[in-house]
Amino acid sequence: MNFEELEEQFKILQEKVRTLEDIEQINILQRAYGYYVDNMMPDDVADLFTNDGIFQLGGRVCISQKSIRNYFRKTMFKRPEEGTKKLDLHMQLQGVVNVDQNGQTAKGRWQYLGFTTDYLGKPPGELQPILGNGVYENEYVKEDGKWKIKSLMFNGSFSCTLQDGWVKSTKIERTYGYLRAEPDKMLDLGDRTWRSGYKVPCHFKNPVTDK
């Protein structure tokens, strides 16, 4: 192997290492998002997004980091039950991250499994154990050497009380109009719970068949 061939091999290995480092940084970024949501840290959540970032929770859509910050501030800290100890366990599992060839953009898919508590029923409501599931399909971009969330899209498969389970109930409503912050726009997406049969399209191909 001559010098030119060694140099080419070095460049290939260097690119592979860079890609692996990018994937790990995106993994950390997404895990941080879950941690900040669980611990009611709205400004830290918003800081993970680009200035023109998009946050989509079902049909609710926020456009821009400023809008996302305002949305999370209100939903996290303007609840009537503020001050009550509650559980939020926001697990993001089965992560698949693919970095584009330019090394500046990427996509990721995550399975959400949540164990939380919230107030249900007529005011003042009763604190209930809640299970939740859904899928994230996100886009990321590297800015000034740091990965940020460009677009976060979450589709909920079900939310239910522990007593009822996801067969009896696929969607529950929180007391006092939970999620009172107004998004920039609302989309009518219809029923996208597991019962409807809807599946969130994958951004990636089969790693074996490439289909």
Image (cartoon, rainbow, N blue to C red):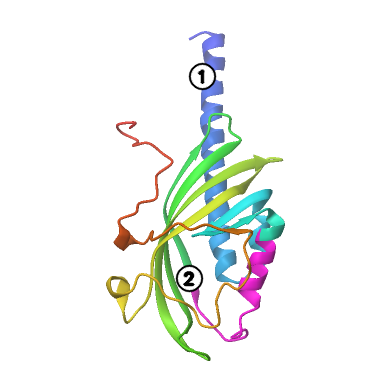
Instruction: Tell me if residue 163 comes above or below residue 25 in the rendering.
Output: below
Q: Which mark is residue 9?
A: 1
Q: Residues within 10 Å of mark 1 (few under 14, many from 20)?
A: few
At which x and y percent is residue 131? 39, 72
CA–CA distance between discs 2 and 1?
A: 44 Å
Rendered image quadrant of residue 177? bottom right
Give the residue at mark 2: 89
Please give the range of residues in magenta: 68-89
**Residue furthest out toward the bottom:** 124
- Of residue 198 and residue 23, the one placed in the foreground of this image is 198
Residue kind at label 1, given as amino acid type: Gln
Residue visible at 63% across and 61% down in the picture? 45
At which x and y percent is residue 130? 41, 76
Judged from the image, the secondary structure of the residue bearing numbered disc 1 is helix
Q: Quadrant of the C terminus?
A: top left
Rendered image quadrant of residue 198? bottom left
Judged from the image, the secondary structure of the residue bearing numbered disc 2 is strand
- Of residue 82 and residue 181, the one placed in the foreground of this image is 181
Residue visible at 55% across and 76% down in the picture? 178
